[in-house]
Structure formats: C-alpha cells, structure tokens
Image: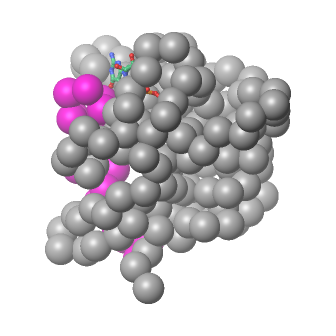
C-alpha cells in the first residue's frame, strides 16, 4: 500500500495551507477562525517520483469534544494511520502548551515525526526557530505554506522515511 503522511498540530498553525500546497490543489479549506474546518482530509501527492497519501487531521472534527481533547485525538489518529507524521507549529507564536501536548503524544509513539515550523515567511523568522528544539522532535524545519519556501526540504525529509 501507499505510504501515509499525516499533518498534525493545534488549530490555525497552517496545516490545511500546507496540505493544499503539497497536493498542489486547493482542496482543503483554509479558515481564518481557529478550529473551524470543513475540509477534505485525504489526498494523493507525489515527491521525487514517490507517491503517498496525505491526511489533514485538522479536518477531523469531533463534535461535543473540548478542543484540547480533539487535538489529542487527532494526534492519535495520525499515529495510528500514518507512516510519517508532520507536526506543524507556528513560527510567529512560538511554543505553546497545546504544541507540547501533541509533541508528547507523538514522541511516545516512536513514529517518524518531522517538525515543520510554518509561517516562517522571511529570513528572520526562518532563523528564529531554536525554541522549537524544546519539543524534543529533532531539527525544526522552517517552512511557509503561503509562499512555498522550505516545503521541498520538508518533503525531502518525509520521503526519506518510505
Ligand atoms: P489549520 O487550522 O492548521 O489548518 O490552519 P490554516 O491552514 O487554516 O491556516 C490558518 C491561518 O494561517 C490562515 O489565515 C492562513 O492563511 C494562515 N497561514 C497558513 N500558512 C501560513 C504561512 O506560511 N504564512 C502566513 N503568514 N500565514 C499562514
Ligand atoms: Mg485546517
């Protein structure tokens, strides 16, 4: 079967933006309201001739659940379904509690995790990513879903795991 890559992270970090960028299509709805998504959550993608499926776990919503519980469940779904997990964080906000919660779940899973520091739109933001080492998930990779910068390097790391 095709390898599965899952995007995880708290709302509004840019998972759907990256999903669309990697899919090369605008299929996941990007919302300005944190936590609000009505997305298509699966797609096919390809990098360096390697095909994979991709899940935007932020589009999996569980009604009547607290946001914090929902974020945990999304991380667990990602671990269960994915061969490689991309954890997305926000360069402009820095590390917050919900990031630490997700990171802890992923860390314990022992799945390959790639840490994408999104919204690193300029040089200064791309260089200011050292705080994210505290998540314990290895080297943070600066990306910009909006501009596309860093996404190729991110995908290079992803497909190394197939
Ligand atoms: P999700 O909730 O994690 O799926 O986040 P979305 O993809 O819906 O994006 C949330 C907000 O962040 C939207 O307003 C996006 O336009 C914005 N956003 C996403 N990626 C970037 C980026 O690389 N740079 C900047 N400046 N904004 C971004
Ligand atoms: Mg989304």
Q: Tell me where residue 44 sits by quadrant.
A: bottom left
Image quarter where the C terminus lies is: bottom left
Please state the extent of the stretch shown in magenta in the rendering: 142-162
Q: Is residue 89 magenta?
A: no
Task: Classify residue 82 as left or right of residue 46.
Answer: right
Identify the residue shown where x is 62% and y is 57%: 78
Q: Tell me where residue 120 sits by quadrant.
A: top left
Identify the residue shown where x is 21% and y is 45%: 25
Q: Is residue 93 visible?
A: yes
Residue 42 x, y percent position in the rendering: 43, 56
Task: Classify residue 22 as left or right of residue 102.
Answer: left
Image quarter where the N terminus lies is: bottom left
Q: Is residue 129 visible?
A: no
Nearest the viewer among 104 and 37 is: 37
Total numbered labels placed on residues in the image: 0
Residue 12 x, y percent position in the rendering: 51, 23
């Amino acid at each position: 079967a095709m390898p599965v890559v899952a995007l995880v992270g708290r709302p509004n970090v840019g998972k759907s933006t990256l999903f669309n960028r990697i899919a090369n299509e605008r299929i996941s709805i990007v919302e300005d309201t944190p936590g609000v998504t009505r997305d298509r959550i699966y797609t096919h993608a390809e990098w360096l001739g390697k095909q994979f499926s991709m899940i935007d776990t932020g589009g999996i919503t569980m009604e009547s659940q607290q946001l914090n519980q929902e974020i945990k469940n999304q991380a667990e779904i990602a671990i269960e379904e994915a061969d490689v997990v991309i954890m997305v964080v926000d360069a402009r906000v820095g590390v917050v509690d919900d990031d630490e919660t997700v990171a802890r779940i992923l860390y314990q899973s022992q799945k390959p995790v790639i840490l994408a520091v999104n919204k690193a739109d300029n040089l200064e933001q791309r260089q200011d990513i050292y705080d994210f080492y505290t998540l314990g998930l290895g080297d943070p990779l600066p990306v910009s879903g909006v501009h596309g910068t860093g996404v190729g390097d991110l995908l290079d790391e992803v497909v190394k795991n197939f």
